[in-house]
Image: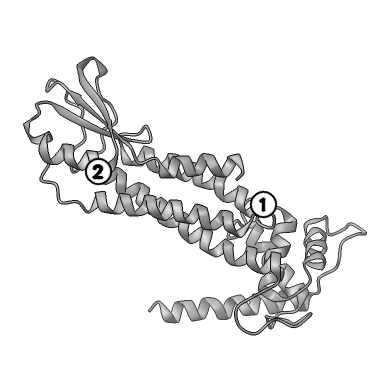
Amino acid sequence: MEADIQVFIDIMTDNHFMVKRYKLESNNFNDSQFDKTEFDEKLLLSKNEYNIDDLLEFMESKLFRADGIFSFELNGFNYSKGLENFLQSEFLKFRMFIVNNFNEIEKSSLIELAEKIISSRNELDFLRNAHIRSRFKGYKFLSSVKYELCAETIRFIDNHQLFILSSSTGKKKGKPKKANEKLTKFTQNQIVILFHYLRERDFIGIGMQKNSYADFISGLTGFAAEKIRQDLSHIDTNPDSTNTVRFSEYDYIQVKRALKELITSIEEDSK
C-alpha cells in the first residue's frame, strides 16, 4: 500500500488518548462548554497514555479520586477545533491521492482500508456514547470529531470503490452498458460545458487530474473518455485560438435551461 495512504491510516486508527493532570492553580482547562487550548506545563503533575478500554477504566475507577485539572489529548490535540482542522487537512491529502490514482488502486486495498477505518469508528462511537459521570468531557468532544471524519472517509471509499470497479473491470451491477450507449439526455458538447463549469467553480472534481476527471464523466454519461478529455482541453483554451472547438450557442442555452429546471425543482421541494 502506498506510503501516502499508510500515513492516513496510521492517524485515523490511532485512538490512544493522552491524559494530563495539572495542579488546581491552573485556570485554563477543558470543561463541558468551552474549548481551552492553553495549559501551564509548569503545573503538570502527571501524564499517561491510554487506549480506549484503559481510558474508560481510568475514568470510572480513578478519575473521581484524583485531585487536579485534567486535559485529554487525541492525535496531539486537546481541543476539538484543532483536531478537526488537522484531520480535515490529512483527509484532503488522502482524498486527492485516491482521486488522482483511482484507476491504479486495487479493490482489495480499499476493502482493507475501509475495514480499519470502520473498526476505528466503532471504537470512537463506543467512547463518545459511554456514560461516565464526570465533568471532564474533553474526551467526548475529541472522539466525536474523529468519529465524524471516520464516517466521511468510509463514505468516500464506498463511492470510489464503485468507480474503480467500473473503470478497471468494465463490470457493473444490473444491465451492462452497450458500446457508446448514452446515459444522459445531453449531447457530448453540452456535457463538456456543464462539467467544465462545475470543475472550474470547484463544485466537483477538486484536485482531479484531467484524465481522471474525463474517466469520471465517461462513467456517468457513456461518452468516450478520450474525446471528453480533448474537449475539456479545448474549452479551457483561449477562445481565439485556432485549436479551440467552437461550442454552439444552442449548447450553452440547453445547459442553462436544464440548470434553471433543476433550480426550480430544488426550490419547490424545499418549500
Q: Does residue 47 appear in this view? A: yes
- Quarter-wise, where is residue 254 in the image? bottom right
Q: Residues within 10 Å of mark 1 (few under 14, many from 20)?
A: some
The C terminus sits in image quarter? bottom left
The nearer-to-camera label among 1 and 2 is: 2
- Quarter-wise, where is residue 165 in the image? bottom right
Which residue, given by chain and number where applicable, does mark 2 sit on? 53
In the rendered image, residue 269, in percent from the top left (x then y), is placed at 42, 80
Which residue, given by chain and number where applicable, does mark 1 sit on? 100
Q: Is residue 2 above or below residue 268?
A: above
In this view, the residue in front, 36 or 235, is 36
In this view, the residue in front, 183 or 4, is 4
| Residue type, label 1 | Asn
- Quarter-wise, where is residue 180 in the image? bottom right
Q: Residue at x 65, y 56 (%)?
A: 102
Q: Residue at x 17, y 40 (%)?
A: 57
For marks 1 and 2, the one nearer the N-term is 2
Helix, strand or loop under label 1: helix
